[in-house]
Image (tube, helix red, strand yellow):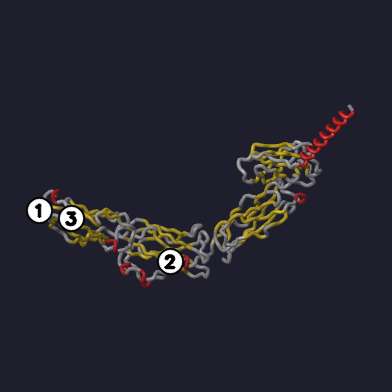
Amino acid sequence: MKTRMNMLRLIAGLLVFFGMIFVFQNCSDPVLAPSNASVIQGRIVDSISLRPVEGALVSSISFPESATTDAQGQFSLEINLTDSSTILVRLTITKSGFEASAVTVAIKQGEVSTVPETPITQINASTGASGFASNVVLVDIQASSIFVKGSGANETSNLVFEVRDSTGTPIDLAHQEKVCFLVASGPNGGEFVAPDSILTDNNGRVRTAVNSGTIAGTVQIIAEVIGRTVFSEPIPIAITGWLPDAAHFSVVSDQLNFAGYNIFGLTNMITAFVGDKFSNPVPPNTAVQFQSTGGIVAGSSVTDNLGRSSVTLLSASPQPSGINFGALRVLNPASLPAYFNEPGFALLTAQSVDENQQFIYAETVVLFSGRTQISAVSPTTFNLGPDQFLDFTFTVSDQNRNPLVAGTQIVVSSNNGDVTGDNQVILDDTQSRGETFFAFRLSNSKPDEIEGTSTTVSITVSSPNGDASFDIFGTMTRI
């Protein structure tokens, strides 16, 4: 009997021993999150007394899950995740009678993340006039547009930000924070801010200056409270160019050729492109003057934010009599066809002023084309037997031998036989007299289908310059 009692005591002792080991092992094992979730743990305390805050709600606008702190101010929030990526979650801590607070934590599926002890402040219970930093706003900007570095104009703009608590009150010195300034984006020309970080003053304000680089564009500045993930909206500042530079100055016409020699009141857009020595657009509202040796052109215009300045050229007197090559300032006469000095061609000149207060120029040529003419048709008659063919040439131009405008249609047709070659032509926008010569071939390729022997070949031109036609008469035979 005694032996049996000793055995029972031994078994009981072993059970207690192993039970204690099991308990100790469970106490020392780390908390594991479910495989498809992340667990966030933390503790919320009163910012003044540092005592735990019970009943505070911890939640995130990005996920539906939430948690409430216990009597020790501790919480455990489990968030279900759809993949294994590490993400940042912004948690909001709220409790009646306390100012809302926020903290950001990185979480990952299957892992436990611990939030540093987070203080929250009772409303009207802090030692200062404000609560903790909750947002940053821009309250003053010296200039929303500055000039590129080295331009000699204003290259900086001062910014003033204000750090406020959750009630909109600027933070006081008791809640002073360090704010850093970031160049969020820009043209990458060396732009920067100085200082790049600073402490808030007794009004919660911080100041910095944006400095331009050597490239025009838009730079965005963000002010961020260090350690609290509180930041401002991006503040855009435009970096614009300097004065016009001759090497970056050009002018073009919307139409190389418009039907304005005989038809008055037609319009053609003229645009100057104006850049500075850094290859940037000049500042908006830079003035450009225009002149034309034909028609009427608006005298001046100002540039837009891309350095473009546009005016309207109006067909009117004087009809252009050709370009005086000796008067050219920019264009090289050797690069221009000799016939540019004949009637129909006008010189358009744009003028501005560079950084040395010297006039600079840009030039382009515009063709005022006239009435439609069909000429130099050869041969003017024909007699084709079975399977014979004949080649024809002809010219379509205006009265000054210049090409007609873009969209002009030239059609060659015949009531007998086949027409090939330039029998269906639509002209491009051109000033070249090479685009006035055309050729086609007339073939008696199907003599069995010929209706009689008389044949008419018609050249028809439909054009804004005016319509015209020319008929060639001849014969085709079946035998």
Sequence-earlier tag: 2 or 3: 2
- Label placed on residue 362: 2
Q: How far apart are the alpha carbons under marks 2 and 1? A: 65 Å
Asked if one can make out residue 13 in the rendered structure from this viewpoint, the answer is yes
Q: From the viewer's perspective, is 294 left or right of 129? A: left
Q: How far apart are the alpha carbons under marks 2 and 3? A: 51 Å
Task: Label 1, secondary structure: give it.
Answer: loop
Q: Which amino acid does label 2 sit on?
A: Ala
**Residue extending farthest top:** 1
Point 28% across, 54% down: residue: 409
Q: Which amino acid does label 1 sit on?
A: Ile
- Label placed on residue 443: 3
Q: From the viewer's perspective, is 338 left or right of 8? A: left
Q: From the viewer's perspective, is 347 left or right of 79? A: left
Can you tell which of label 2 and label 3 is closer to the viewer?
Answer: 3
The x and y percentages for residue 135 are 68, 47
- Label placed on residue 479: 1
Q: Is residue 291 above or below residue 22?
A: below
Asked if one can make out residue 237 in the rendered structure from this viewpoint, the answer is no
- Which residue occupies the foreground of this view, 111 or 386? 111
- Give the class, few, some or many, for how many residues have Cα within 10 Å of label 1's Cα (few <14, many ≥20): few
The x and y percentages for residue 229 are 68, 49
Q: What residue type is labelled 3?
A: Ser
Can you tell which of label 2 and label 1 is closer to the viewer?
Answer: 1
Point 68% across, 55% down: residue: 180
Q: Circles 2 and 3: CB distance less than 8 Å?
A: no
Task: Label 2, secondary structure: give it.
Answer: strand
The x and y percentages for residue 226 are 70, 52
- Image quadrant where one finds the N terminus: top right
Sequence-earlier tag: 2 or 1: 2
Q: Circles 1 and 3: CB distance less than 8 Å?
A: no
- Give the class, few, some or many, for how many residues have Cα within 10 Å of label 2's Cα (few <14, many ≥20): many
